[in-house]
Amino acid sequence: MQKKHIDFIFQTLDKLYPNADTELKFSNDFQLVLAVVMSAQTTDKQVNKVTENLFKIIKTPQDVLNLWLEKLTKSISSINYYKNKAKHIFWLSKMLDENPWLLCPDLEELQKLPWVWIKTAKVVSYVLFGSKVIAADTHVHRVSNRLWLVNTKTPEKTSQTLEKIVPDKYKQIAHHTLILFGRYLCIARNPKCESCPFTQICEYKKSL
């Protein structure tokens, strides 16, 4: 991978999205963890609809424990896999209430929490603590392959490869800029190639 290729991509993305940040809405670290857990297989927009009211009463792990599981389940029923997510949110809250130090930058510690796998752990570590990791969802995976940053079959492998090839100076913007580019321009079907600054290097465009 040529350095100038990587520089061009991330310098351009930084210009497109100079204030790139998570689109999940939260007011403290604990709420961010819950929002990321809920966002699995669900859009950030839908999660924000749920948390708009939920986070008015849930600000700490103890707040979750004070709710009936049935009430929590009903409150998030509009998102995918809500029953399982409600159970895991309850047990995650119990674990954090007893072991608050688990909410830290360390990926292994974070993955001790229910429903927190490597991608979720990387998002939490990156957003809250500025860790130099690059979580890869379907957007990041798709865009990275189309722009020939990687040649991978799975988001997990994409994440690992990006972390190896992307210089540290870009790791603070890589995750969010790639997501936003994939969410609003380089969409899965009918990408907006007419508005894309990368048509000359895009593998998808070349295949059309």
Image (cartoon, rainbow, N blue to C red):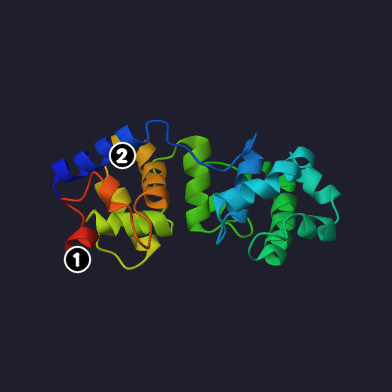
Tag 1 secondary structure: helix
Within 10 Å of the Cα at label 1, are there few (<14), some (14-19), or many (20+) other Cα atoms?
few
Q: Is residue 58 left or right of residue 67?
A: left
Read off the residue under disc 1: 207
Depth check: 118 or 32 in front? 32
- At x 32%, y 68%, the residue is 153
Q: Which residue is mark 2?
A: 13
Residue 171 bears which disc, if any? none
Q: Residue at the location (32% across, 49% down)?
A: 163
Side of 120 where 188 appears, left or right: left
Quadrant for the C terminus, please. Answer: bottom left
Q: Is residue 59 above or below residue 142?
A: above
Q: Residues within 10 Å of mark 2 (few under 14, many from 20)?
A: many
In this view, 205 is above or below 31: below
Which element is circle 2 on?
A: helix
* Position of residue 97 measured from the top left corner of the image (x, y, whole percent): 74, 45
Q: Amino acid at mark 1?
A: Ser
The reply to whether callout 2 and callout 1 are in contact (CB within 8 Å) is: no
- The reply to whether residue 172 is in sight is yes
Mark 2 → mark 1, Cα distance in angstroms = 23 Å
Q: Residue at the location (73% across, 62% down)?
A: 87
